[in-house]
Amino acid sequence: MANSLRDLLREPRGRLLSFAACLGLLAGAAPTFAHHAFAAEYDGEKPIDIAGVVTKARWVNPHSWLYFDVTGSDGSVANWGVELGAPNALAGKGLQKADLQPGAAVHVKGFLAKNGGPFGYAVTITLRDGRTFQTGGAQDVPAQPGSALK
């Protein structure tokens, strides 16, 4: 059998099959490399409760992102970015990208990123019209996010 496998790999068809099998293995492994745990990037002990004006929404898989300007008490403006769930999950909860157009007012509750910058994980987003959406989908968000976010 070793000779027949070696002969097969020498043929163009055999090399193609071998290449296709390797690609299949790599493609199957890619999602596991891309996904991360909440605790790896965000601090469950540091809730955020901030409001601002949308500058950009990125509706991408596996996690969408919302960027918005927050005006501090000293008048300075910081552009914040918060991670959301997947576009399909957000749409299933009733939130559409059209709800997050530049200029829209948002109120975000979630958790601060461990990197110390103006980044976080959004658990809920409330729009100007009062609609509130659960935007996070991480499995290991702290068990009682509502109590930490009041």
Image: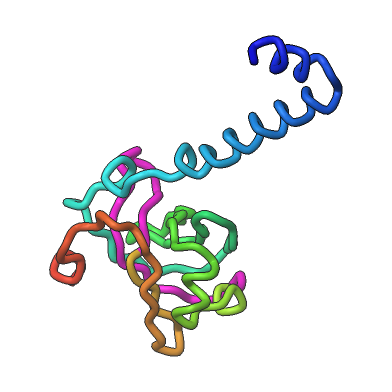
Q: How many marks?
A: 0
Left or right, 138 with respect to 4, comes to left
The residue under the point 28% across, 60% down is 48
The residue under the point 59% across, 58% down is 60
Magenta residues, as a range?
101-122
Image quarter (top left, top right, bottom left or bottom right) of the C terminus: bottom left
The spot of residue 7 in percent (x, y) is 77, 14
Which residue is farthest front?
A: 1
Q: Is residue 121 magenta?
A: yes
The spot of residue 5 in percent (x, y) is 69, 17
Q: Nearer the viewer, residue 64 or 115?
A: 64
Q: Nearer the viewer, residue 75 or 26?
A: 26
The residue under the point 36% across, 56% down is 121
User: How was this image coloured?
Assistant: rainbow
Which residue is farthest bottom?
A: 129
Looking at the image, can residue 9 be seen?
A: yes
The spot of residue 110 in percent (x, y) is 30, 62
Image quadrant in which you'd find residue 9: top right
The spot of residue 90 in percent (x, y) is 48, 72
Looking at the image, can residue 67 be seen?
A: no
The residue under the point 33% across, 58% down is 138
Image quarter (top left, top right, bottom left or bottom right) of the N terminus: top right
Which residue is farthest right?
A: 12
Vertical order, 92 against 25 (above or below): below
Q: Is residue 17 magenta?
A: no
Vertical order, 29 against 108 (above or below): above
Image quadrant in which you'd find residue 76: bottom left
Left or right, 138 with respect to 28, comes to left
Left or right, 26 with respect to 81, comes to right
